[in-house]
Amino acid sequence: MRRVRARLRELYGIPSAAPHGRPLDELILTVLSQSTNDRNRDVAFRALRERFEGWEAVRDAPLEAVEEAIRPGGISKVKSRRIQEILRAIGDPLSLDWMASAPVQASRDALCELPGVGRKTAACVLLFSFGLREVPVDTHVSRVATRLGLLRPGAPFEEQHDAMLAFTPPGAELELHLNLLRHGRRTCHARNPECSACALSRMCPRVGLG
């Protein structure tokens, strides 16, 4: 892991982003990111924020109005229903700010009890909102880490998250998540990975097997 981290640093630098302290925004943004690209996600999120005065208004709005607002993000029928289910499940006050000072496990459990929220979404909320010790494992991170032999092939996402967290040095959670994500998008593609041009090829069992 140290070798992988050092090489990724050479390629992509050391990313930094201060925790933004807006967990509800991060939660809804992550829901909107499912099965779409970052641009469409951001357009849908911006439309939602411009149309409604706050998350209480989104929660209480007609379902059709929410669906219309987020249509650019794709799968708007499913996502609009899910967003309202999540906001209603949080209850009153409609806030996740308490997680900033709560044990990570308690916050993770509370998030994963919300409708349709899994470990990756919970990890995004905790890491990006509060800088807490959690590493989101999306499809790109999972693919790169598995090909490098860091994760067990076929492991469920819960196991992958536990493993990533175990071998990630404290304070490097954001760095490793973003740099593995970048490498998956730019080089280690799901289909036709660019192994001959990959800077990690010498430490990759996949390349060694030919």
Image: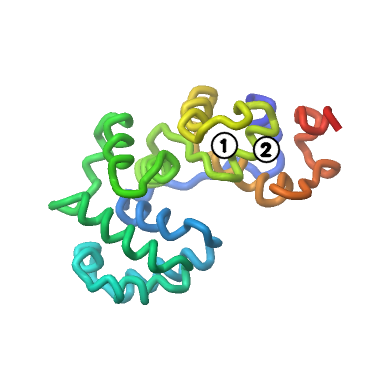
The x and y percentages for residue 72 are 47, 73
Q: Could you tell me the amino acid type at mark 2?
A: Leu
In the depicted structure, whether residue 63 falls above or below residue 173: below
The x and y percentages for residue 154 are 60, 32
Disc ID at residue 8:
2
Secondary structure of the residue carrying tag 2 is helix
Q: Nearer the viewer, residue 74 or 176?
A: 74
Q: Could you tell me the amino acid type at mark 1?
A: Leu
Give the residue pinned by disc 1.
Answer: 176
Q: Nearer the viewer, residue 44 or 11?
A: 44
Q: Is residue 58 left or right of residue 169?
A: left
Residue displayed at 43% across by 69% down: 44
* Circle 2 Cα neighbour tier, 10 Å, few/some/many (<14 / 14–19 / ≥20): many
The x and y percentages for residue 81 are 32, 62
Q: Is residue 77 left or right of residue 175?
A: left
Q: Nearer the viewer, residue 134 or 205?
A: 205
Quarter of the N terminus within the rendering: top right
